[in-house]
Image: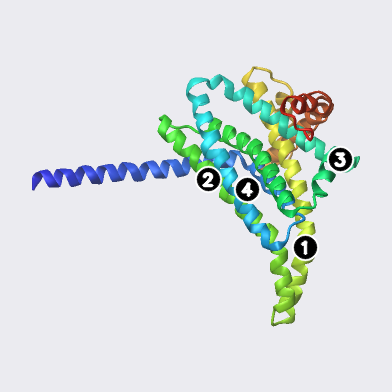
Amino acid sequence: MSGLLALLDDVAALAKVAATSVDDIAAAAGKAGSKTAGVIIDDAAVTPRYMQGFAPARELPIIWRITRGSIFNKIVILLPLAMLLANFAPWMITPLLMLGGCYLCFEGAEKIFHALLPHADRHVEEDMSVKDPGHLEEQKVRGAIKTDFILSAEIMTIALSAIEAPNAWMQGATLAAVGLMVTAAVYGSVALIVKMDDVGLYMAQNARSGAGQGFGRGLVKFMPVLLKLLSIVGTAAMLWVGGSILLHGFHEYHIPEPGHTIHLLAEGAAQALPRAADAVKWAVTAALDGIFGLVVGLLLIPVVTRAVGPLIAAVSGDKGAP
């Protein structure tokens, strides 16, 4: 009997440790996930455009296919790579983060450049002119998963840099939790966004009250505004996150500017409005980080479009590379 009681006591102790570990993983995942907020917003803002041109019945199946691809990207490919980097080549994390930051700055600046100076994209037009819906769907899903891979790599790298775990097991479990949490948040939001107009149309046609029908019509009219707002927020988030990643990288390599100047300006603005000092400091820092990201992105546009893009296209055989 004493042996059984001792065994039960050991099991209870193990269960307590396991429960504590789960709590620690959840807390660490929440903290690391919050660091990736800007990229998550961009991911959620980018994905709905891949749903354009499809029948409503195909929207959720397509989102599910992209979600599966995103989970595969994060858990099967990126998680092992991130763990190898963290444990065998930690010096590579900062350069990879900065490379991802450059990508975010380029993407954000290119969106603004395209909005201010619209120009036709022959490859996009060719993709949209495909007559076979099944072939078009395959192209869209592949494109979405490719974009997700790039954004997921940035998310996982940012999360990895923010994780403070006592051992590799906890680090890997936390990173996996972040990956699954982000995927659920992003594609759950995307599913909700792309179906909101269908919900509004149903309410406009079938609601029993005039108020319900009016709400449905308003929802349908609001959707284009929401998608435009998401695009703006996503672009701003890309520039903010990309700029802040580069500035943090400069700090790691003991390059003080322009981060030091941004810090001084933010501190000065906070002192001018002491009642909202923290909010003002954050807002000024984020705005200046975003402006820095925009400048970097604009400088990268000719480099990417005239040198990097053609090189990637030549190596991969992808004529549509930027």
> Which mark sits nearer the N-terminus, 4 or 3?
4
Residue at the image position 67 percent from the left and 26 percent from the top: 98
Residue receiving disc 1: 222
**Neighbour tally class for label 4: few under 14, some 14-19, many 20 plus, Cα within 10 Å:** many
Residue 89 got which mark?
Answer: none
- Single out the residue that lies furthest toward the left: 1
Three-letter code for the amino acid on which mark 1 is drawn: Phe
For the point 63% across and 28% down, which residue is it? 97
Instruction: Relative to 241, say whether 99 is above or below.
Output: above
Residue 283: image x %, image y %?
71, 40
Q: Secondary structure at mark 2?
A: helix
Q: Viewer-nearest of labels 2 and 4?
A: 4
Task: Please state if 181 lies on the left or on the right of 294 as rendered.
Answer: left
- Separation of marks 2 and 3 at Cα, in angstroms: 36 Å
Amino acid, disc 3: Arg
Secondary element at tag 4: helix
Q: Nearer the viewer, residue 15 or 50?
A: 50
**Spatial separation of the CA atoms under disc 2 and disc 4:** 14 Å
Label 4 near label 2: C-beta < 8 Å? no
Q: Which residue is mark 2?
A: 180
Image spot of residue 88 (x, y percent): 49, 20
Q: Is residue 278 visible?
A: no
Side of 116 where 263 appears, left or right: left
Q: Earlier in the sequence, mark 2 or mark 4?
A: 4
Q: Is residue 75 above or below residue 264?
A: below
Q: Nearer the viewer, mark 4 or mark 1?
A: 4
Question: Pointer 4: what residue?
Answer: 66
Say whether disc 3 or disc 1 marks the residue closer to the N-terminus.
Answer: 3
Which badge, 2 or 3, is on the more N-terminal residue? 3
What kind of residue is marked 4?
Ile
